[in-house]
Image: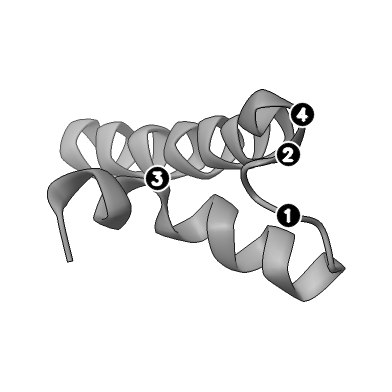
Amino acid sequence: MSLNEIFLWPGTKVCEMMGVDPEADAGLIRWSINTFFYLVVGLLVVWFAVG
């Protein structure tokens, strides 16, 4: 498994569960899911680091 596949894993799995091809639509659905996932992870890291 490459580093690229590891970073895209959350969006790929959600797309597969929804029955959507992760490569379809230029990967926009997978990209938006990954963006939201890593936003939440990043905010939690910052919140715990500051608090």
What mark, if any, has residue 24 been given in the picture?
2
Which residue is label 4 attached to?
25
- Decide if residue 46 is on the left or right side of residue 36: left
Looking at the figure, which quarter contains the C terminus? top left
The amino acid type of the residue labelled 3 equals: Val
| Secondary structure of the residue carrying numbered label 2 | helix
Determine whether label 1 and label 2 are within 8 Å by CB. yes
Q: CA distance from mark 4 to mark 1?
A: 9 Å
Q: In the rendered view, tell whether residue 9 sits above or below residue 17.
A: above
Residue shown at the point (58%, 67%) measured from the top left = 13
Residue 19: x and y in percent read: 84, 68
Residue 49: x and y in percent read: 17, 38
Q: Residue furthest right?
A: 19
For disc 3, the neighbor class at 10 Å (few under 14, some 14 to 19, many from 20) is few
The amino acid type of the residue labelled 4 equals: Asp
Residue shown at the point (43%, 38%) measured from the top left = 38
Q: Nearer the viewer, mark 2 or mark 3?
A: 2
Q: Nearer the viewer, mark 4 or mark 3?
A: 4
Looking at the figure, which quarter contains the N terminus? bottom left
Mark 4 or 3, nearer chain start: 4
| Secondary structure of the residue carrying numbered label 1 | loop
Determine whether label 4 and label 3 are within 8 Å by CB. no
Which residue is label 3 attached to?
41
Which residue is label 1 attached to?
21
| Secondary structure of the residue carrying numbered label 3 | helix
Q: In front here: 9 or 22?
A: 22
Q: In front here: 46 or 18?
A: 18
